[in-house]
Image (cartoon, rainbow, N blue to C red):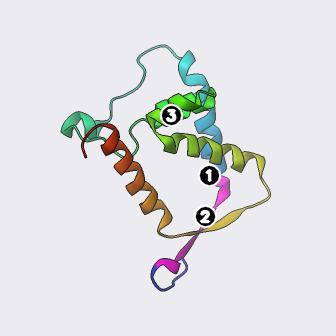
Amino acid sequence: MTAGPGLRARTTVELHDLRVAGAAMLAGALLLPALPGPDGLPCPLRSLTGIPCPLCGMTTSVTAAAHFHIGAAMAANPAGLVAVVMAVGLLVARRRRAVDVPAWLLPAGLVVMWLWELARFGAI
């Protein structure tokens, strides 16, 4: 992480591992509907407390986005659509090996995702 005052701190993200994870995520999303069995595991936080976690709906959202059901993806969790777009972008644009991002981006993204889920489930 690059030190800097306040919101100027940045971190370098190596893209190789994100490409591998993105490819695995896309493959899983394409194959998931063909697999026998239940639709997935319930969210442990929501099951125990009734409060959804920031990632609630991500599997549904990513699977819907991978099958071009954009409305269903947005309804389940808009971050899933963002994850699919980023994964495809990383796989297409293979020139870059790393990228500098603001250090606050991940925590802020999780806060926004959690607020979305809390509003979606009527907790706020």
Q: Residue furthest right?
A: 95
Q: Position of residue 110 (x, y in %)?
A: 41, 55
The amino acid type found where label 2 is placed reads Val
Residue at mark 3 to residue at mark 2: CA–CA distance: 24 Å
Q: Residue furthest left?
A: 49
Q: Residue at 44% x, 15% y: name it.
A: 37
Residue at mark 1 to residue at mark 2: CA–CA distance: 9 Å
User: Is residue 63 visible from the viewing direction of this image?
Assistant: no
Q: Which residues are magenta?
A: 7-17
Q: Position of residue 91 (x, y in %)?
A: 73, 46
- Is 18 covered by the magenta stretch? no
* Disc 1 to disc 2: CB gap under 8 Å: yes
Give the mark nearer the N terminus: 1 vs 2: 2
- Name the residue carrying label 3: 61
For label 1, the crowd category at 10 Å Cα-Cα, with few meaning under 14, some 14 to 19 and many 20 or more, is some
User: Is 69 located above or below residue 26 in the figure?
Assistant: above
The amino acid type found where label 3 is placed reads Ser
Residue at mark 3 to residue at mark 1: CA–CA distance: 19 Å
Left or right of residue 66, residue 93 in this image: right
Q: Secondary structure at mark 1?
A: helix
